Image (tube, rainbow, N blue to C red):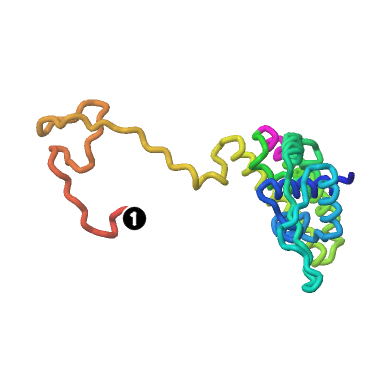
Amino acid sequence: MGARTQVLELAILGRLRDAPTHGYELRKHLNATLGAFRTLSYGSLYPALRSLTERGLIVAEDAGAASSPLSGRRARIVYRITGAGRGHLEDSLAVAEPAAWDDDASFDVRFTLFASTDATTRLRILEGRRARMVDRMENLRQSFARTSRRMDSYTAELARHGLEQVEREVAWLERVIDTERGTRGALDYDDIAPAAPPPTSTGPPGPPGTSPPRGTRRPPSADADGAPATRNENPLSKEQP
């Protein structure tokens, strides 16, 4: 079985785990969500479905619409994952091999299934992918530096665009890894409330003209004699929220 076929089967099982799906809807989903399968044809999909069915990982069921020779309609087949298929999927998601990050299609599929992958495996795949993309980025930089002078402006611009794409992916991977490790990476800034300042005791008020006890802070609404401070009513001087 080829590597692309294995990736396709993993993507199919991951989709069917959520709900039974028609072949047309399955192809539409894979084309829309997985860049590696945007050109997926029925000639690739149905052999994979047949192989999964023969191995007992999925079953093909009649959707209930009986075929009619007069109308020309054929019964719609719905594919559903089996218990064996779920077990196969779980075993596959627990493995982190170089193919999971070296191959673009494999990484895309594995990333879409991270919600069902344990944290250790997720982090290993992400770090492997980052190392792979850093190598690719350095190779592209060196190649561009050697050959850019011999390129016409359009070829050079295309090469620069490819390098920028890899650089953006490396930066994105670093943010995702940062988040996976539980640190305050860029991806989770919006979900983290700012830390509250430590409470400061103002202490009991003393007699007029005396200083507050050491280690306490005078309330901002009082002057040195304990009288209310005069408000500045100039609206431009107020701190905007």
Magenta run includes residue 125: yes
Q: Residue at x 75, y 41 (%)?
A: 85
x and y, in percent, of residue 136 in the image: 79, 46
Is residue 2 visible in the rendered structure shown here? yes
Residue 45's image quarter?
bottom right
Pick out the residue farthest to the bottom. Answer: 70
Q: Residue at x 13, y 30 (%)?
A: 206
Is residue 104 visible in the rendered structure shown here? no
* Location of mark 1 (residue): 240
x and y, in percent, of residue 83 in the image: 73, 39
x and y, in percent, of residue 107 in the image: 75, 46
x and y, in percent, of residue 170 in the image: 70, 46
Question: Would residue 102 appear left or right of 2 to someone viewing this image?
Answer: left
Q: Is residue 178 above or below residue 233?
A: above
Q: Secondary structure at mark 1?
A: loop
**What crowding class fits label 1: few (fewer than 14 Cα within 10 Å), some (14-19), or many (20 or more)?**
few
Magenta run includes residue 187: no
Nearer to me, 94 or 22: 22
Q: Amino acid at mark 1?
A: Gln
Nearer to me, 233 or 165: 165
Pick out the residue farthest to the right. Answer: 1
Q: Residue at x 28, y 56 (%)?
A: 237
Nearer to me, 239 or 145: 239
Q: Which residues are magenta?
A: 120-127
Q: Residue at x 77, y 51 (%)?
A: 60
Question: Would residue 134 appear left or right of 206 to someone viewing this image?
Answer: right
Nearer to me, 125 or 44: 44
Question: Which quadrant holds the N terminus?
Answer: top right
Magenta segment, prevailing SS (helix, strand or loop) = helix
Q: Is residue 224 above or below residue 65?
A: above
